[in-house]
């Protein structure tokens, strides 16, 4: 037997050396012995291990705590901030100046279309505009003539009154002083003056209805022009060319402008393509404010309906550090007959552009708020069956500490017992600590607080 072992010894020796190296590496962390697995035993880990599991700590403190309800949601563009761009008159697309994904500003030129239909409509509108302007000139001229007649009528009436006064004085002094010829001349002059005054008054009376008729014709032409502009679907940017014959703007070019600031989310237009009225050529959306759609289970509607706040927190699975703020905008009064849920709309600002259309997000609807409570990060709490605990940092080791949780939300949990303000707990990597074998009791005895009698 000894002879057989002596023959195998050269082969076993390397294996024994490798095994010793592995045992030494497993004990690691300064060559200390590893104790048996016990969740209640304190744990001491090296900085390298702490960095590997992403271990972070946080201090327990007082703070406000919100009671929240967690839902899933999907991001949608606000319908009031989503625009479809199309032509109102048919024509050939000459150029498209924006691509999908380009940012645009309100009033920026998006595309140009050569439209013979637009040219014909603007020509007809200009004819009506010219007639309308002629009538306005006639109205002004007639009103000036009316003012002139009023002055002439007033002067004629004063002249007639003066002639009649002269006649009355001549008749009152008698025939001995004023001859019959003079009286006859004065009488004739008074008659002529009074007749002239009456003619001016008649002309003035006739002119007033003429002016009113001219104004009615001008209004009718203006309405006809406006109706033609509306029926002909002339773009708002072309209104100036339609009403100003001296405009340098080509009457056959349709210029499509951005209705608001946003980003081009779709483009179907191509240069050379024939565009028909009503075709959607581009789509622009403004995602600076979005709507998030969620489904609220029937059993939770009463809690949300009795909430004291409309605040909502928004999180994305792609960015764990992002916490957006939203507001409950609408809870449908009608339930889905299959899913037994009520449709919920959350309005959320999106200035950073993190929320994108179609993205799934986590929603935390705030129901009420506790002003002062002892709080810990919700990520610090580990649940083992009915037991809730955290890892309390004591010196250089981490000791399991049972707690009694109270109110909690997606960020913090209320600590009813087990911790006090100032305690330092593991806020990230707590679950990883439960998977590590603790150090031997002798190694951490000095770091474990002595029990008081």
Image (cartoon, helix red, strand yellow):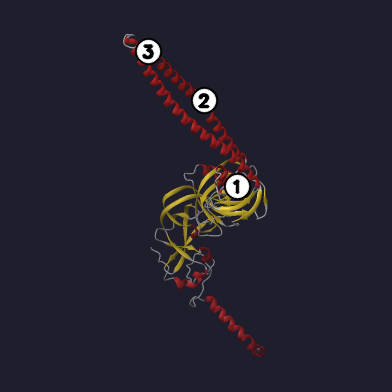
Which residue is denoted by mark 2 in the rendering? 209
Circle 1 packing at 10 Å, graded few (<14), some (14-19), many (20+), is: many
Decide if residue 75 is in sight here: no
Circle 2 packing at 10 Å, graded few (<14), some (14-19), many (20+), is: few
Decide if residue 29 is in sight here: yes
Secondary structure of the residue carrying numbered label 3: helix
Which residue is denoted by mark 1 in the rendering? 251
Compared to residue 406, the image places residue 187 above or below, namely above
Placement of the N terminus among the 4 image quadrants:
bottom right
Residue 128 percent location from the top left of the image: 58, 38
Camera-side residue: 217 or 88? 217
Q: Quadrant of residue 190?
A: top left
Compared to residue 191, the image places residue 333 above or below, namely below
User: Looking at the image, do the residues carrying marks 1 and 2 touch, with CB atoms under 8 Å apart?
Assistant: no
Which residue is denoted by mark 3 in the rendering? 183
Front label number (1 vs 3): 3
Residue at 59 percent of width and 82 percent of height: 18
Residue at 60 percent of width and 83 percent of height: 16
Task: Give how far apart the Cα atoms at labels 1 and 2 are.
Answer: 38 Å
Secondary structure of the residue carrying numbered label 2: helix
Camera-side residue: 168 or 423? 168
Q: As drawn, is 372 to the left or to the right of 291?
A: left
User: Looking at the image, do the residues carrying marks 3 and 2 touch, with CB atoms under 8 Å apart?
Assistant: no
Camera-side residue: 388 or 70? 70
Residue 196 percent location from the top left of the image: 44, 20
Placement of the C terminus among the 4 image quadrants:
bottom left
Residue 93 percent location from the top left of the image: 64, 52
Secondary structure of the residue carrying numbered label 1: loop
Earlier in the chain: of badge 1 and badge 2, it is: 2
């Amino acid at each position: 037997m000894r002879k057989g072992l002596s023959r195998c010894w050269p082969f076993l020796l390397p294996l024994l050396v490798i095994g010793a190296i592995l045992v030494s590496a497993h004990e690691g962390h300064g060559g200390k012995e590893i104790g048996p697995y016990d969740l209640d035993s304190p744990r001491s880990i090296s900085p390298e291990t702490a960095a590997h599991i992403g271990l972070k700590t946080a201090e327990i403190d007082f703070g406000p705590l919100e009671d929240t309800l967690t839902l899933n949601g999907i991001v949608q563009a606000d319908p009031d901030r989503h625009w479809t761009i199309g032509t109102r008159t048919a024509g050939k697309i000459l150029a498209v100046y924006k691509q999908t994904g380009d940012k645009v500003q309100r009033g920026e030129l998006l595309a140009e279309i050569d439209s013979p239909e637009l040219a014909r409509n603007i020509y007809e509108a200009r004819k009506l505009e010219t007639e309308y302007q002629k009538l306005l000139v006639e109205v002004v001229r007639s009103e000036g003539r009316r003012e002139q007649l009023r002055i002439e009528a007033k002067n004629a009436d004063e002249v007639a009154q003066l002639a009649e006064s002269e006649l009355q004085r001549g008749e009152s002094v008698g025939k001995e002083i004023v001859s019959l010829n003079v009286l006859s001349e004065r009488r004739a002059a008074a008659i002529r003056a009074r007749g002239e005054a009456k003619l001016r008054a008649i002309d003035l009376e006739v002119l007033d209805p003429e002016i009113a008729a001219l104004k009615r014709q001008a209004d009718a032409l203006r309405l006809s022009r406006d109706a033609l502009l509306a029926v002909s679907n002339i773009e708002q940017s072309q209104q100036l060319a339609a009403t100003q014959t001296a405009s340098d703007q080509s009457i056959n070019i349709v210029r499509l402008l951005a209705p608001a600031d946003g980003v081009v989310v779709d483009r179907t237009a191509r240069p050379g393509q024939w565009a028909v009225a009503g075709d959607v050529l581009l789509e622009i959306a403004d995602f600076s404010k979005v709507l998030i759609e969620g489904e609220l289970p029937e059993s939770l509607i009463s809690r949300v309906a009795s909430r004291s706040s409309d605040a909502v927190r928004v999180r994305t699975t792609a960015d764990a550090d992002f916490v957006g703020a939203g507001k409950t905008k609408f809870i449908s009064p009608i339930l889905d007959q299959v899913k037994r849920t009520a449709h919920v709309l959350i309005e959320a600002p999106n200035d950073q552009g993190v929320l994108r259309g179609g993205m799934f997000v986590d929603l935390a609807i705030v129901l009420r708020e506790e002003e002062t409570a002892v709080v810990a990060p919700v990520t610090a709490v580990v649940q083992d069956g009915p037991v809730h605990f955290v890892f309390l940092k004591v010196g250089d080791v981490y000791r399991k500490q049972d707690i009694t949780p109270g109110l909690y939300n997606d960020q913090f949990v209320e600590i009813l017992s087990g911790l006090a303000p100032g305690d330092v707990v593991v806020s990230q990597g707590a679950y990883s600590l439960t998977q590590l074998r603790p150090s031997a009791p002798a190694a951490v005895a000095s770091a474990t607080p002595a029990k008081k009698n």
